Amino acid sequence: MDQTAISLILQAGYVVKGVLIMLLFFSVVSWGIMFYKWRYFSKANRESIDFVRYFRAGKEPAGLNKVARACILSPLANIYKAVYEDRDIGDSEGIRRSIRRYEALESAKLERYLNFLATTGSTTPFVGLFGTVWGIMNAFRGIGSAGSASLAVVAPGIAEALITTAAGLACAIPAVIGYNYYLSIAKRMIIDMEDFSEELMSFFIGLMNEVRKK
């Protein structure tokens, strides 16, 4: 009798079904993260471009802070806002330490959730392989019970087992691609942030010197 993949899954044992449910969870969360990061990076990049344009246009500090407050996701704007509103900075060295600290915080935001994609890509093939091994064991037990090793007896059990391998790969491959893609974007944005931080440092040190002269 012909059997579809769905019918094989429905007839599978509890362990194989548990493996497939686990793989489904990893897949759904991974795709959710990839969609979220696509929207996050797209908006953060647009906001950073807008903020840099205002910054280099020579807008006064308080006005820049208003622009930074409107750019919620931009790491450049967030660093400016955090340093501008930090009242505990006493000297130029304090400005440098503050910028480096906020850089680290923004870098962590850019890389947030990417570890889950890396974990999914590295572990789900083995989870699927475990389901395959378990399914093949059940298939051999079925052969022993039937007392026959004919294709009609073996094929359904082996097909059921191999479904978990396919599911593991289907879960892992997009996660690996997504991880590498978004990690490259995050690293590029971190480099841009570090470059811009040098401009911010000069800006705030100059601003502090002007305030002291007054």
Image (tube, rainbow, N blue to C red):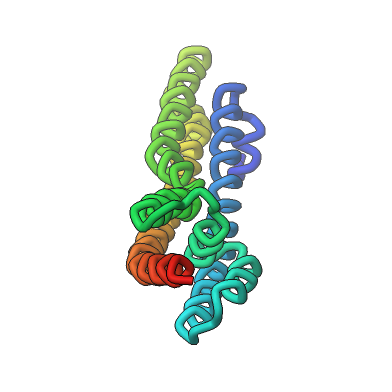
How many numbered discs? 0
Residue 33 place in picture, x, y as percent: 56, 52
Vertical position of residue 10 compared to residue 140: above or below: below
Residue drawn at (60%, 29%), measured in percent from left and top?
17
Residue drawn at (38%, 61%), measured in percent from left and top?
190
Vertical position of residue 57 compared to residue 36: above or below: below
Residue 186 place in picture, x, y as percent: 41, 59
Q: Considering depth in this image, is 164 or 82 the residue closer to the camera?
A: 82
Residue 98 seen by the camera: yes
Vertical position of residue 71 compared to residue 174: above or below: below
Residue 156 place in picture, x, y as percent: 52, 33
Residue drawn at (57%, 33%), measured in percent from left and top?
22
Q: Considering depth in this image, is 161 or 139 the residue closer to the camera?
A: 161
Asked if residue 123 lies left or right of residue 48, the reply is: left
Q: Considering depth in this image, is 84 or 173 the residue closer to the camera?
A: 84
Residue 47 place in picture, x, y as percent: 56, 73
Q: Considering depth in this image, is 207 or 4 the residue closer to the camera?
A: 207
| Quadrant the N terminus occupies | top right
Res. 40 image quadrant: bottom right
Asked if residue 59 lies left or right of residue 98, the reply is: right
